[in-house]
Image (tube, rainbow, N blue to C red):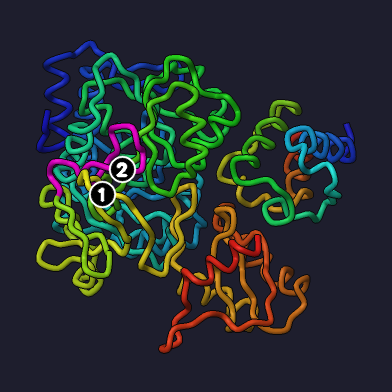
Amino acid sequence: MTRQEVLDQTRKIIYDSFPDMKDVDLQEDTVINTETAIDSMGFVLVICKLEALFDVRIPERQWKKLQTLGDVVEAIWKRVQ
Amino acid sequence: MRFDSFDHLLRHFAEQSPDAPALRYEKETLSFAEFYDRVRARAEELRGEGKTCLGLLCDGSLDNVVEIFAANLAGLQLVLLDASLESEVLKTLIRYTDVDALWGDEDLKEELALSLMPGVKDGKGKILFFTSGTTERSKAVVLTDHSLCQSAWNGSAKLPLAPEDTLLCLLPLGHVFGFVCGLLWGLSCGSCVALGRGQRHYFDDCAFYRPTAVSVVPLLLGFLVKMRCINPEMKLVLVGAGDCPPALLAAAGAMGLRVSFGYGLTETSSGVAISVKGDPYAMEVCPDDTITIAEDGEILIEAPTCMMQGYYKRPDATRAVLQDGVFHTGDLGMFDEDGLLHITGRKKDMLVLPDGTKIFLPEYESAVMQALGHTELAVTLRDEKPVLVFSGEGDAKAIAGKLRDMMRTLPRGQQITDILMTDEPLPRTATGKIKRWELQQKVSEKA
């Protein structure tokens, strides 16, 4: 598993979960809350799907620190390693 | 039944229905007798520790609930803290409320340990809640186990649960709506309360516990409905702490759910009016409360059994809203021809988000002004989300960049989601105050 694969899977989960976002170019510095259509509940959905897919657990207290797509990928990647 | 205290409530059910399930958390179930035994044993330990004011870093677990009741029985002042807040905010709140002991996550306790204070002398029975949207400048509302028990009775008089019911507690215990309507409502009816297992289980807590009732904020109801998380046994949904769009209530109703809407404040120990018939926006006033509408439309509440003692160490702030037993809510409302209460708007400079969080605009906007070095701006809601209206010349991208660091420190729901640039001046009154209603309308029209 590479970091790029984590990034690709994260993008896929977001696009699959939020079809309205298919035209949004998701970059690592994309701020999830303000530059996408994902609200706080949508964010919970994305994190839970990622946790299940990669079999990792990010403590809930840290969730709010994950602001950009890159932050999310990094949090998953650290735990996958 | 009406209970005078937490001890009275637990003792009653431990004697009357000792084997009935009181609490469920993950795979563990505590009967009322086991729950009371555990609370008393822990209270004994706490008495021996000699502390006076316990700060609870709430995680909603079974141990968390036991600790709350035990500390109250042991005569400690309780401060219910939201463990997801930034450490610096928590430190300020701990110092302000005289906390001398902490319960919760060990790492976080260690981080906060240096902020502990010498404690209090007269805290017995007091339970301090912060209003939602907590910041380091928030006021702590002083309630008691007595006022909370009265509030639970007050609500259940309008919306009773049966001992066979299971109430799902998904909301944070550190917020009074979550505490009273997610926990105490069920316990005071002798029902079982299933404690939610955290945000990551919002999807499957209903399937796991098979509850018959749940208390939610509008945002959470939207999520449960949209993701089809609601189990077939669910009969009753109590929505509170924020404005709920009619389409969402209709969607929940179409699923066969009875949806009730509650109105209340932290200062009144939670709900003072609840809808119990067809129209979820038409609320009956609870039996212990008297509501009148001031000339300017403000909702005034008299709630002798449920009213706060005051804001902690802020008599000035208490006097500003509570005069002769009448609480000035800052909300606007009216009674219809059937005597049912409808909420029509807000008088205060405040936004209420779908997750129940309140944003106090003067404080919030002042921080934004400081971050941007620009004063001609205001924050309002568009599609239920905070947006910034920036009046004057500026580069939207640069402004977004400056805002980003500030937003990182705020909970996700409170973050500004868009910036609306305008050449027009902000609508203001003759005294220079922003006309919030007019601004909101302009933004909605442009959306």
Report the amino acid beneath label 2: Ala
Any mark on residue B282, and which?
A: 2
Secondary structure under tag 2 reads: loop
Name the residue carrying label 1.
Answer: B336
Nearer to the camera, B277 or B132: B277
Report the amino acid beneath label 1: Asp
Of callouts 1 and 2, which one flags the residue occurring earlier in the amino acid sequence? 2
Secondary structure under tag 1 reads: loop
Closer to viewer: mark 1 or mark 2: 1
As drawn, B442 above or below B155: below
Q: CA distance from mark 1 to mark 2?
A: 8 Å
Q: Chain of mark 2?
A: B
| Horizontal side, residue B65 vs residue B74: left or right | right
| Horizontal side, residue A64 vs residue A3: left or right | left
Query: What residue lies at 43% left-to-right and 49% top-to-bottom?
Result: B243
Question: Which residues, given as a range, are shown in magenta?
Answer: B272-289
Residue B188: image x %, image y %? 20, 28
